[in-house]
Amino acid sequence: MDNGIISLKIGVNFRNGYKGVQFLNAGNPVFTFTVYSNLYRYRFGGAYDYQNTTGYNTWASLAYQSNSVFNFIYTKISSSFATIDMSRTSSDPSSPEELATFNSSAAINKTVDEIRFFVDSADNSLEANNLYFNFLSAYNAYR
């Protein structure tokens, strides 16, 4: 979506297995966020295989918080530039919102035409091991 904004929220509790979201263009990742092996990781571009951890950056400041909600806002500014803003809140009212903003004309130069959510290799079938997709909004910023 050129000149578009995509906003979504996902909820996670336990950090085992692989769970997350991918923004794609023609089936190829533009941006991937994954909760993997007790870490919160993100990557621009790369292979579709979210289990391949090559090229991921770690959102190092994030400690474990139960019932975390991650908010993603993808804003396509032009044909060669977009931003991705991420934030996390928790069910713990004493925990502040944690923010990260990623701007990259080299990494985010594709239009997002698909979004995939995934959960794989969780320890067991407990509900707390799942990813919960809670909100999705997509619209053109220049109506």
Image (spheres, rainbow, N blue to C red):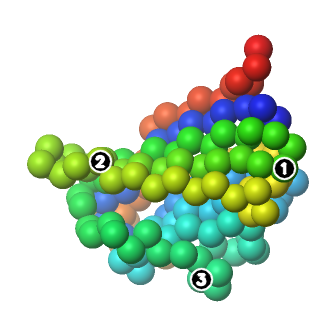
Q: Out of 75 and 103, give the one closest to the viewer.
A: 103
Depth check, mark 2 against mark 1: the one in front is 1
Q: CA distance from mark 3 to mark 1?
A: 26 Å
- Which residue: 33% across, 53% down? 98
- Residue furthest toward the left? 94
Please indicate, yes or no, whether residue 123 appears anywhere in the rendered image.
Answer: no
Residue position marked by numbered label 1 in the rendering:
80
Q: Out of 99 and 65, give the one closest to the viewer.
A: 99
Q: Quadrant of residue 13?
A: bottom left
Please indicate, yes or no, whether residue 89 appears anywhere in the rendered image.
Answer: yes
- Which residue: 14% across, 44% down? 93
Residue position marked by numbered label 3 in the rendering:
53
- Relative placement, left or right, of 28 versus 95 is right
Residue position marked by numbered label 2 in the rendering:
97
Q: How many marks?
A: 3
Among the two numbered marks 3 and 1 on one chain, the one whose residue lies closer to the N terminus:
3
Depth check, mark 3 against mark 2: the one in front is 2
- Which residue: 59% across, 82% down? 53
Question: Where is 120 relative to 100, above or below?
Answer: below
Give percent across and percent down for residue 25: 82, 53
- Relative placement, left or right, of 67 versus 123 is left
- Which residue: 81% across, 54% down? 109
Circle 3 SS class: loop
Q: Out of 111 and 67, give the one closest to the viewer.
A: 111
Give percent across and percent down for residue 8: 53, 40
Q: Amino acid at mark 2?
A: Glu
Q: CA distance from mark 2 to mark 1?
A: 30 Å
**Quadrant that contains the C terminus:** top right
